[in-house]
Structures are given as C-alpha cells and as structure tokens.
Image (tube, rainbow, N blue to C red):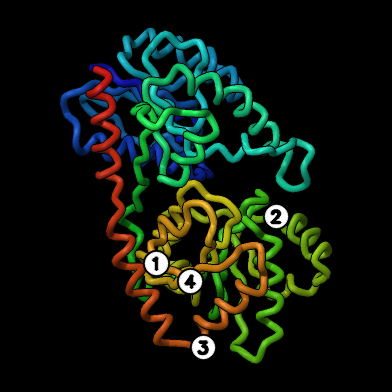
C-alpha cells in the first residue's frame, strides 16, 4: 500500500503543536512499519533535517504557493502522481477535490464554534486561518473515510456539531503522546546551559501563553499579579515566544503595567530545551479556556512540574486527576492554586507523583499503531 501523509509545515523552524504531532506520527510509523510505502509531502523550508528518509519513507518537497493553494492544488496532484492509495492530512484541513481516499486529523473545531473574525483577540493571521478552516472543514469531513480526533471530549463535540449518528465508525478518538525526551532533568550542566541560554530566573512559574484568546493569558496575568500581592515567596512568570509590545498592551488593559518587571520573555524555545525549563519551574500554568488535548500538561508531568489546569473541555480527561483543577474564568482560583502549590509541600509532591504516572499512559508509538490500523482498514 502507498500512503501519502501531508506535513506541509514540518520543515519550518518554529513548529507548533500540530506540527509536532505529525512529526511524531511519521517518526513512529518509521519504527513500526516496514511493509508499506510512505510519501511525506512537505513544503521546502530551513529545518529539513527533522525528518530522515528510509527505504520505504520518501520525503517529497512541494512548492505551490500559500497554504490554501498548496493544499488544494499541489498536494492532491502529487498524491496522484505517486500513486497513493490513501492520503492522510494531519492538520485540520484537506483538499476538497481529491479523488484519493482521505483521512483527516481534526484536532479541534474551535474555529467553527461561533467565532467571528471581528471578535477581539488573536492576530489577523489566526483569524484568516480560521476563515479558511470554516470553509474547508465541513466539506472534507463529509468525504473522509476516517476523521481522527485527539480526545473523547473533542470527538463528542465533532459528533454533535456535524450530527454524526451514534453508530458512525468514521469518527475515531486517538490520544496524542508525549515525546521521550521529556524527562526530569537532573544534570546540572544541562540545567545551567538552558538557564544561561534563555536567561531564566531562579524562581519562576512557567506559562505557555500566546495571543490566541483560548490560552487565557489575560486571566493568567491577573492571577499572577494578585499572587505577587500576597506574602508568599515572589516568583517571576516565564513566557515563551510572546511579543513584548503585545504583552505591554495587555498589561495596560488589565491595569498593571508594572507587572512587566516580574515577567521574563524567552523568545522562541527549541523543543529539546523545554525539558530543562519544565524541570526548573515551581509550577506549570495551563488554565486554557478550550483545548482539544493538551500535550504540554503531559510534558510538564514527565519533567516533574506540578500542573494547574482547567475544568473545561479535554483538560480534566487528559490530566486524569494529576493536576490542580480550576475554573479558568476565575482568576482568583488560579491564584489560590498557585498559593497551594507554594505552601503545601505534601500536596505539591502528591501532584508531581500522580503526574509521572498519568503521563506514562500516553505514547506516540501507541498513537502510530492505531493510525496504522486505519490505513490498513482502508486498504
């Protein structure tokens, strides 16, 4: 069988969540499948070394302009050229006119849930991407042989939104994994290397915020501001890849411009440096308003960082009782959870130990095996 996998953005340097999921899927399929022939379709970019071809895995670099034209024209043309028996599109969207049997990984349908492009929050790049998804996803869902999603919460959301019958076998929940390099780092030279590289403070909470409204950055900043007003040990807030101008504007909105003095912006962090950052933080903040899965929670757990997360969407399902659960709409609950983890060593240790056990339940190889079974079923 010849299997095509879309990995358009895998060669870009600054990879995001869906890119990492696709990358891990491909790497783990290489480990477990020597029988089928694979064609990985990517757009040329600087990080071509992130994937290595092998006897039955071929890397095909395709030009083709911006994301929509690459996906709608160049990708199906290439999949046909290489005689693919199935085409797996990994990042929510797919060609609407492809004649090849299609599998789509639909990570979430947040962009279909009453989101206007004029709603405050998010960049115009994000909003235009959501417009494309709103056009594309309803069309490709109808024609896909399988729709993979990443949690039972998201499966139920998709089922309800599109009106899938209860016995429809096309919609499948397959959990993401967590990469093996996410482990508790104890090597002082590695810890110091990363600390110096990103100029990390000695005592910090870690937050993967960005400009997407679902990340709840506003309430995290309010909660952190309130924490600093308590007599508890002071901390810095470490944030990745966030523009200072955007942060200054948000701090002005919440009425605490001086909070910038307690926030450390690292810029973009290489994925392999993240374990040392998780390993040195006092706590990890993941109080999103909406997530389809939440890989960073598992990364933090594997590195021995206690996690604070939300009682919404997939987060209780994935955290599995191994995190402090709060209402993300209430900044005071985030503050209270931070104080608990700072003051109560027994609670902190309990959360950390539960986190180690919970994270062990998820692996990329298990995910790859389940996806391979879907390929075989189509064949």
Check disc 4: other Cα within 10 Å, few if <14, some if 14-19, many if 20+: many
The residue lying at 74 percent from left, 60 percent from top is 247
The residue beneath circle 3 is 343
Q: Is residue 241 visible?
A: no
Quadrant location of residue 6? top left
Residue 148: assigned label: none
**Gap between marks 2 and 3 measured at Cα:** 32 Å
The residue beneath circle 4 is 324
**173 vs 304: above or below:** above
Secondary structure beneath dot 3 equals helix
In the shown orientation, is residue 11 left or right of residue 249? Answer: left
Q: How many marks?
A: 4
Q: Position of residue 304 (x, y in %)?
A: 38, 71
The residue beneath circle 2 is 243
Name the image quarter holding the C terminus: top left
Give the mark nearer the N terminus: 3 vs 4.
4
Give the mark nearer the N terminus: 3 vs 1.
1
**Gap between marks 2 and 4 measured at Cα:** 29 Å
Name the image quarter holding the N terminus: top left
The residue beneath circle 1 is 321
Which residue is more in the foreground, 195 or 132? 132
The residue lying at 66 percent from left, 62 percent from top is 329
Give the mark nearer the N terminus: 2 vs 4.
2
Which residue is more in the foreground, 65 or 315? 315
Q: Are marks 2 and 1 in contact (CB under 8 Å)?
A: no
Quadrant location of residue 371? top left
Which residue is more in the foreground, 50 or 161? 161
The residue lying at 70 percent from left, 78 percent from top is 226
**365 vs 141: above or below:** below
**Gap between marks 2 and 1 measured at Cα:** 33 Å
- Closer mark to the observer between disc 2 and disc 4: 4
């Amino acid at each position: 069988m010849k299997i095509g996998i879309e990995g358009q953005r895998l060669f870009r340097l600054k990879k995001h969540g869906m890119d990492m999921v696709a990358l891990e899927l491909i790497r783990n399929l290489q480990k477990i499948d020597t029988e089928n022939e694979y064609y990985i379709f990517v757009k040329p970019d600087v990080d071509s070394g992130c994937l290595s071809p092998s006897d039955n895995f071929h890397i095909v670099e395709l030009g083709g302009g911006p994301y929509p034209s690459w996906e709608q024209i160049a990708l199906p043309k290439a999949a046909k050229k290489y005689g693919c028996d199935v085409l797996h599109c990994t990042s929510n969207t797919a060609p609407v006119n492809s004649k090849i049997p299609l599998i789509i990984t639909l990570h979430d349908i947040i962009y279909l849930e009453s989101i206007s492009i004029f709603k405050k929050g998010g960049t115009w790049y994000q909003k235009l991407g959501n417009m494309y998804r709103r056009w594309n996803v309803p069309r490709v869902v109808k024609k896909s042989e399988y729709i993979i999603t990443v949690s039972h919460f998201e499966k139920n959301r998709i089922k309800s939104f599109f009106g899938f019958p209860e016995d429809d076998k096309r919609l499948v929940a397959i959990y993401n994994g967590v990469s093996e390099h996410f482990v508790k780092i104890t090597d002082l030279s590695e810890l110091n290397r990363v600390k110096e590289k990103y100029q990390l403070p000695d005592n910090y909470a870690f937050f993967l915020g960005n400009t997407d409204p679902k990340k709840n950055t506003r309430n995290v900043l309010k909660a952190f501001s309130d924490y600093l007003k308590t007599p508890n040990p002071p901390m810095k807030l470490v944030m990745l890849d966030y523009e200072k101008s955007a942060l200054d504007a948000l701090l002005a909105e919440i009425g605490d411009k001086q909070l910038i003095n307690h926030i450390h912006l690292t810029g973009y962090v290489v994925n392999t440096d993240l374990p040392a950052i998780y390993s040195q933080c006092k706590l990890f903040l993941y109080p999103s308003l909406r997530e389809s899965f939440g890989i960073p929670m598992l990364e933090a757990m594997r590195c021995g960082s206690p996690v604070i997360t939300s009682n919404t969407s997939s987060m209780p399902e994935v955290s599995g009782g191994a995190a402090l659960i709060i209402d993300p709409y209430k900044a005071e609950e985030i503050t209270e959870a931070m104080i608990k983890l700072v003051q109560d060593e027994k609670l902190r240790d309990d959360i950390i130990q539960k986190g180690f056990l919970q994270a062990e339940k998820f692996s990329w190889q298990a995910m790859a095996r389940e996806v391979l079974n879907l390929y075989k079923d189509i064949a």
